[in-house]
Each structure stands twice: as structure tokens, then as C-alpha cells.
Amino acid sequence: MIHAAVIGTGSCLPKRVLSNRDLEKIVETSDEWITSRTGIQTRRIASSDEKTHQLAVESAKRALDMAGVQADELDLIVVATVSPEMIMPSCACLVQNELGASNAFAYDINAACSGFLYGLDLVDKYIGARPDMKVLLIGAERLSARVNWSDRNTCILFGDGAGACVLTGKDDGRGIIDSNLFSDGSLWSLLYMNGPQNLGPELKHAEKQDCYIRMMGRDVFKYAVRAMEEAVVDLMLRHDKSVDDLKLVIPHQANIRILNKLMGRLGLPEDKVFINVSKYGNTSAASIPIALDEANRSGRLAPDDLLLFCSFGGGFTWGSMLMHW
Ligand code: UT7
């Protein structure tokens, strides 16, 4: 049986570090509040020459280098993002151009914080049909450009960055095992961001200005814990796996309290969960691939390890995935 397996990972974080103390000078907040409510201590903020696609390209170069794959060998490039600089062309086409990946077709997907997980599922389907395909999947965000820097409810949470994977078909038991993905569009208004393209004549001037992230944090928190728990439990039962079988869990990094609740409900020991939310905050679609790259480069993964991914984000979109490393 052929599965899509990761053969290289990479990530790229902007240079500028914004600490909670720095945020105290921007909005009425405190290091104590942010740390205790979110677990976030710093986040990275992109400069004008660290655009979404530039972060994506740097992460891609590192993943290609690890995979030993040349850009012109790529067949497909998918970028998961909700914060591209341009609506058209896609971020993926800009990445294709800068990499010189002239043989690949390229497009973006939007599933908010679940974008990378949805992307892995999609790539698995392509590779299932054509196992020799070489695919570059990237999660890249520049959310600092899309938060209202006078709204303390949101601006403290998000950060910028990109993470990438190169995948191809393997028949040695490695790769994606299965996924469990969900959406509920009826809850869209709890977490959303108007597009700058939403400039129809029916909109008032104030609405045209409002392209910032809006979130009903407390509601999102409750749904996130319950939805990820259910998505994980179903998937584990389907494959007759228990927590003991897992080597590492790589969840979307939004809030340490969400992760602590999830670990409690699933009976997951802390040393089986990769957590870097304190350093980067919530980087939406980039959070899982950044964490995966850090886990990979720090030697926490060995061939055949069983990995579990889970995410929750705007849409709502959520899900889980099992993978043999
Ligand atoms: O990645 C996609 C999914 N997103 C998430 O998973 C995020 C889910 N939500 C959360 O992580 C949390 O709800 C937040 C971190 C956003 C907020 O934490 P909370 O414990 O739910 O706080 P809250 O929104 O209930 O606010 C509690 C209080 C409020 O004051 P009052 O009304 O009790 O007087 C807020 O105005 O904290 C206040 N507050 C702040 N105070 C200091 C809100 N933001 C801040 C702040 N600094 N930055």
C-alpha cells in the first residue's frame, strides 16, 4: 500500500521578536495576563521584506534541501494560508516562481488553522493516485498584517512564520495512515476575517476598513477542546490505537490552556506532546509544520514512530491525522 510520506521538513521564522513586555507598551495588557491565559511569551513579527511568500520560500528551500529534491523535480506546490499578500496570483504560484519549480502546478488552500492538516490529507490523495509525485506542502502566515494592533483580545495571540514538507509515495509502511477532518460553517462568525477583496458597493466605508481578525475567544476555546478531543478519539478507535502507541503528538499551537485541557481529557503525558506556543504564539496554518520541523531537527522523531496531529480553526475547521514517520 502506497502512502504519502514526509521526506524533508523546513521552517522559517521572521527575525523580529515581540515579547509580552513589548505588547504592554502597545495595548493595556500585562506579561502576567498573557502568560497565564495563553502560555505565549514571544511571537515573531515579519518586516516588509519578510512577506508571506518569502517566508514560505525560505521554509521550502530548507525542506527541499533535507529531502535532496531539486525545485524542478516538484510536481505540485500547495500553500495553506489565510494571509497571502495577494489574492491573485496564489502564494503557491509566487513560491513556484521564486523556487524555479517550473514543472509543478501550484495553488493555495484556506482552512485557517487546520490548513496544513487539510493539505496533508489532500496531498495523500494525489500521491495515492500517482505515487511518484513529489509535492511541496507549505503552511505560511503573516497574521501581524491582519490583526488590529489596538485590540488586546487578538493582537497578543498571533505571530508570523512558515513551515514546509516535501512528500512522496512510500510503500515501506511510512506515511499518512488516515485522517478525520470536519467543518462547521454555521459557526463562522465566532472567528473570521473580512477579505480586502470584500469591497462591494453595498459595504459602508467603516466595513471596508475592517479586514482584521475577529474572534469570540471564550466560545472558540470551548469548541476547540471538545472538537479536537472527539476528532482524536474517533481516529484512534478506528485504528485500534491507544496513547501508549503514540510517539509524539503535534497539535495546532493556539493556547497552552487548550493543550493542557486536551492532554487531560486524552490522558496524554506532557512529554508526548510537542509544544512551542510560548515562542511563536498562534501562527495558524504554519503552526503544525513549524512544530514538525522543530521536532524533526531536534532528533525527536525516528523512522516508524507513530505521530498524531490535531488542529482547530476558523470556519470552523478541525481534525486529526495519524502518520507513521
Ligand atoms: O487558532 C484558532 C483557534 N483560536 C483559539 O483557539 C483561541 C481560543 N481562545 C483563547 O485562547 C482564549 O479565549 C483567549 C486567550 C483569547 C482569551 O482568554 P480567556 O480566558 O477566554 O479570556 P476572556 O476573553 O474571557 O477575557 C477575560 C478578561 C476580560 O475582561 P473582563 O470582561 O472579565 O473584565 C477581557 O477584557 O480578560 C480581558 N482581556 C485582557 N486583559 C489583559 C482580554 N484580553 C486581554 C489582554 N490583557 N490581552
Image (tube, grey):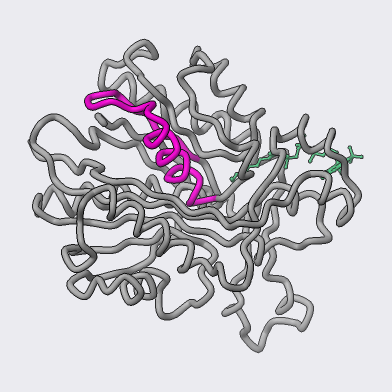
Between 50 and 36, which is closer to the camera in this rendering?
A: 50
Between 314 and 286, which is closer to the camera in this rendering?
A: 286
The verdict on residue 298 being magenta is: yes
Q: Position of residue 88 (x, y in %)?
A: 44, 80
Boundaries of the magenta span? 284-311
Q: Is residue 199 above or below residue 290?
A: below
Q: Is residue 198 left or right of residue 303?
A: right
Which quadrant would the C terminus be assigned to in this image?
top left
| Quarter-of-image position of residue 231 | top left
Q: Position of residue 1 (x, y in %)?
A: 7, 35
Q: Is residue 72 left or right of residue 246?
A: left
Q: Quadrant of ligand 1?
A: top right
Q: Is residue 304 above or below residue 162?
A: above
Q: Residue at x 19, y 68 (%)?
A: 72
Q: Is residue 297 above or below residue 267?
A: below
Q: Residue at x 23, y 33 (%)?
A: 177
Q: Position of residue 9 (x, y in %)?
A: 34, 46
Q: Residue at x 43, y 27 (%)?
A: 249
Total marks drawn? 0
| Quarter-of-image position of residue 90 | bottom left
Q: Residue at x 32, y 51 (%)?
A: 63
Q: Position of residue 107 (x, y in %)?
A: 33, 68
The verdict on residue 226 being magenta is: no
User: Which residue, as the protein is rendered here, is positioned at the far bottom?
Assistant: 201
Between 107 and 58, which is closer to the camera in this rendering?
A: 58
Between 215 and 45, which is closer to the camera in this rendering?
A: 45
Q: Is residue 77 left or right of residue 310?
A: left
